[in-house]
Each structure stands twice: as C-alpha cells, then as structure tokens.
Amino acid sequence: NAAPLRTCTTIVGKDCATELVETSGEVTEQELEQLGKKIESLVSDGGKASGVCIMGSMPPGCGDDTYASLSEKMVGKDTLVLIDSVIGLDSLLKTLKTCFESDDREGGAVLKLNAAELCKLAGADKSEAEKVTIEELTAATRGFLSKYECASSALDYLCVTDGKFPGYLVEVPKDSTEEDKFNLIQLPAIDISTEIKGGMLYPIGAGDTVAAGTLAAWQYLHHEPQTGEDNFFGVVPKQVGSVLSSVKSKWLGDASSDERSIKMATSFAFGLSCGSASCLQQENSVFNVDDALRYFSDMDSPMIQ
C-alpha cells in the first residue's frame, strides 16, 4: 500500500488507557485487485487456507464486502475462521455459509466480540463497565441470530469477552427450533491485579491478542497430533501444545459437555490468557508466553451454564 503509515497515540492513565487512532490511508482499486490475485495465486499453489483471522476496521477505499470477497477466495470446507470484526458482517456470514455447506466439512467459524458489542448488534444497550448477566447474554444472542439469518449456518460459536469479568463460549444452534436454548460455557476471569508493574496496565491490543491466541490454540487442538506423532503444521510450539492438550483433557474429564465444545473452550481460554498477559507489557499485543501459560494452567475448569 502506497499510503503513509498512520500514527496511533496511547494515553495511559492510572486505571485506564485511551488510544487516539489516525485515519488509515486509502487503499486503491488497483491495490485491492493485486491483493485478490496474490491470494488466488497462493490458493492455486497450496490450496485453501488452514486458518483465517479476520480482524479490524476497513480502511478507506475498501467496500463493506471486502472481507467476504477475500474469504470466498481462501476459505474452504476445512478452514478454521476466527472473526474479530463487525464490518461487512452480513455479507461475510453469507459467504461462510456457502463455504461450509459440505456435509463432510472439517472446518468452521467463530465470532469473537465483547458483550457490549453483542448487545449492540442485537439492538440492546450495555455498558462495558458492567458485568453481563446470563439473561442479557441469552437475549443478545437470540437477537443477534434473528438479525443475521445466516449466522446459524455460518458460525459454530460466539466467543464473548467481558473485560475483567468471566468470558463466555456460546454454541450457535443449527436447528431453528432450538434458538431459545443456548449452551453456554463460562470461563473464569483472570486476576492480574497483583502483577501490575508500577500500577499500570496496558490493555490496548489485548483484544487482538485474544483473537490470535484463540485461533492458534484452536488450530493446534483441531489437528492435535496423537501420541508419538510429530506432524503438526501449525504455529504453536510443541511445549505450548502439550499444555493445551493437558488442560483440554482435564476439562473434558471434569465437564459434561462434548469434546468439540471443550476444545473450543480450551482454545478461547488460552486466548484470554494471552490477552491478559499482554496487558502487563507496554508494547501493544506483546506478551510473555510464560505469563500466558501460567494464567492458563491455573484456570479453574469452565462452568457449563
């Protein structure tokens, strides 16, 4: 992209941080065309993507359907997709519905968002400073599925963050007759207050870290190598993968939920641990892996609601 880099300024206070984000430079029609051709070339050489993370706002020059059109090129029936954006969501969900129509699909998609965003999408108001209730979460999920008709076909789960409060994994029902019943898994909140360095937290970029950590863990557990195998092709180091497998097995033994949901809950919990660890570092979306693994390993088993 020929546009100059934008400047983002973070103002850090004692108990909060505010980011002043300069407007992105415009992406030209030619640059978008080049991006599309590059993706087509990569798919032609290596097949559809194993994992796709869709994050952030859309810069000027890109239509609301940009994420949908790019996903159409690189998402196949076995791709794992994590969405951390609400830009062009309707068209994106329609595209993913088509991508996952195959009966033998192994892939899937999750939408990661905070509780206030989910309530807003469903037409309800919620302050980010207040803990979401189960009733609010259920009503917001019902409203979201009603507003986005393709969501039940395109998505498998909602990964709902709620600031310093517990997060929730919401299974998206595939049967319209079950849209009043939602399987909810509550993930314990992580308390980092005792480790704040100099009284400061740096939460800018923590949401991006949650998304990246969740997708990386999901990819590992989805292709989890069996004992004696060493053929995993993801981005998670072997030592981190062994911790993921150990926690997943423990939680599966403690819970009444199915293995697929526990794998997703484990992945989301790891992402939340990475996001919490990043709040201790001044640089955005940077974290100490040992901090993240400690938070993750110390988590109590999730609660099935």
Image (spheres, rainbow, N blue to C red):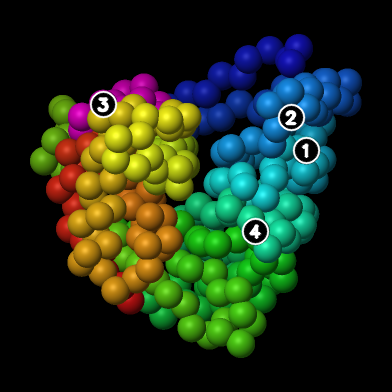
User: Closer to the N terminus: mark 4 or mark 3?
Assistant: 4
Q: Dots 4 and 3: beta carbons under 8 Å? A: no
Residue at 50 percent across and 61 percent down: it is 158
- Amino acid under label 1? Lys
Q: Position of residue 77 (x, y in %)?
A: 67, 50
Residue 288 circle label? 3
Q: Bounds of the magenta span?
A: 280-291
Earlier sequence position, callout 2 versus callout 1: 2
Judging depth in this view, the residue of 40 and 185 nearest the camera is 40
Asked if residue 198 shows in the view, the reply is yes
Looking at the image, residue 237 lies above or below residue 71:
above
CA gap, disc 3 and disc 1: 35 Å
Q: Which residue is mark 2?
A: 43
| Residue underneath mark 4 | 104
Dot in front, 4 or 3: 4
Vertical order, 65 against 187 (above or below)? above
Left or right: residue 154 compared with residue 113: right
Return the residue nearer the eye: 16 or 194: 194
Image coords of residue 177 (percent x, y): 61, 87
Mark before the other along the chain sequence, 3 or 1 = 1
Tag 4: amino acid: Asp
At a point 37% along the width and 62% down the height, the residue shown is: 259
Q: Residues within 10 Å of mark 3 (few under 14, many from 20)?
A: few
Which numbered tag is attached to residue 73?
1
Categorize mark 1 by other alpha carbons within 10 Å: few (<14), some (14-19), many (20+).
some
Precedes in sequence: disc 2 or disc 4: 2
* Residue 129 x, y percent position in the rendering: 36, 58
